[in-house]
Amino acid sequence: MNIFKIARRNIWRNKRRTLITVASVFFAVFFAVVMRSLQLGSYAVMIKNVVSSYTGHIQIHKTGYWDDKIINNTFPEDPELEKKVSEIQSVDKIVPRLESFALASFDEQTKGSIVIGIKPEKENEMTKLADKIVAGNYLSEDDKGVLVSEKLASFLKLSVKDTLVLMGQGYHAATAAGKYPVRGIIHLNSPELNNKMIYITLPEAQELYSAPEMLSSLSILLKNSDDINAAEKAISEKIDLNKFEVMSWKKITPELNQAIQSDNISGEFMLAILYMIVGFGVFGTIVMMTAERKKEFGVIVAVGMEKTKLVGMLFYETLLLGLIGIISGFLVALPIIFYYSTHPLHITGAASKTFESFGFDPVMAFSTHLHFMISQIIVVFVIVLIAFIYPLIHIFKLDPVKSMRN
C-alpha cells in the first residue's frame, strides 16, 4: 500500500510528462472505440437493409431450390414445420412466400419480373412494405390486386388502378396467366429490386401458378442478428436436411458478406497503425521518464530500497497512467457513441446517391455493442504494459554508483 501511495504521488511530480502519457492513451482509446463503433454500426445498417427488405436472416427452401429457382422446386405449406422453427428462442418472425418469374405487360410495354406471393400482414411485420408505398394502398389479406415496384411501374407506364397482365409458366408446366388491378406502387431501396418486383397475395400467387398450398421459401427474422450462426444450427437440427436447405443471408447475398469482410480487414489494419503510433508514443514517454529519473533510481537503491519494490512502484505508476488515459478516453467516447446510435448521421448530396445505388440507406450509425469496446480497451492496456518492459529491464540492470554519477 505504501508503494502504491508513493507511485500515486510520483505521477504528479512532473505534470507535463504525466499529461503527455495520459493524452497518448486517451486519444488511442477514444479514436479506436469511435472508429470501430462507426464501422460496426455501418455494417449493422447494411445487414438490416438486406435482411428487412427481402431476404430475412435465414431462409428455408426445398433442397436444390437455390441452384435452380423454378416453380417446381417448391414445397407444401406445413404448419408443423413453422411451429418447430418458431419454437427456437432466437426466432422472431416467420414469413412464407411463393416466388417465381413472369412477363409483366401493360399496353404495349412488357418486362420480365419477379412475382412474390405474400401474406400481407406477416410480410409487413418483417419488411415494413406498407411504409414503402409511394402511391395507392397496401394489400389486404384477401386482395386480388398487386403492388408494383416504382421503376417497373415507370417502365411499364402504369399507375394505380391500371390493370397489369402477368404471363409465365406454372407448376408442372401449367400455363400461368392473369390480370390484376394495381393497388399500389412501392419504392424499394435496392435499385435491382426496384426495377422488377411485383407483390401479390399468397393465395392469388398459388392460383396463378397452379401451385395450391405450395411455398418457395420461409424467410426467418431473428430477434438478434448476432445469433445467426446458433439459429442456423438449431433450425438445421429441427428439420429434415434431405428435403430442405437452410441458408443465412451470408450465403444468399455473398457479395455483401465479402464486402463487409474486406472492409473489416482494412478497418483492423487502420487500427493496427493507430496502435503502433500510440505504442511508440507511450514507449517514448516511458523511455524519457526512465532516463530523467536515472539518478533518482540510483539514490533510492543506494539507500536500501529493494529493486523488486522499485519495479513495483514503477509498475503502479505505469498502471495508473494507463488507467487514467483509458477511462477518460472511454468516458468521452461513450456519450458520442450512444448519441449517434440513436441519431445516425444522414448523408446528403452525391454521396447519398452512391449509398442508394447499392440499395443502402444513406446513414452512418454507431454500434453500442460492449464486446468491441472492451477489446479496444484491452489492446491499449496491453500496449501500456508492454511499454513497461523497458524500465523493468533497466531497473534490474541498474548500477547505483554509475547512476548517481550520471
Image (cartoon, rainbow, N blue to C red):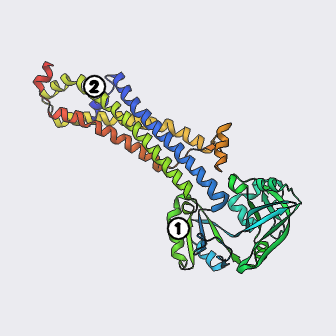
**Residue on which the image places disc 2:** 288
Name the amino acid type tagged 2: Met
Mark 2, secondary structure of its residue: helix
The residue under the point 38% across, 34% down is 278
**Residue on which the image places disc 1:** 232
The residue under the point 66% across, 41% down is 352
Camera sees residue 303: no
Q: Depth check: give the residue in front, 80 or 363.
A: 363
Name the amino acid type tagged 1: Glu
Q: Locate residue 121 relative to residue 61 in the image: left or right.
A: right
Label 1 and label 2: CA atoms lie apart by 54 Å
Which badge, 1 or 2, is on the more N-terminal residue?
1
Q: Position of residue 210 (x, y in %)?
A: 76, 78
Q: Locate residue 8 relative to residue 153 in the image: left or right.
A: left
Comparing labels 1 and 2, the label whose residue is closer to the camera: 1
The residue under the point 40% across, 38% down is 273
Task: Tally the numbered discs.
Answer: 2
Q: Determine whether 255 is above or below 290 in the image.
A: below
Residue 8: which quarter of the image? top left
**Which disc number belongs to residue 327?**
none
Residue 104: which quarter of the image? bottom right
Q: Assess disc 1: are there few (<14), some (14-19) or many (≥20) residues with their C-alpha within 10 Å of its C-alpha.
A: some
The residue under the point 17% across, 37% down is 308
Mark 1, secondary structure of its residue: helix
Q: Quadrant of the N terminus?
A: top left
Q: Position of residue 83 (x, y in %)?
A: 62, 76
Q: Quadrant of the C terminus?
A: top left
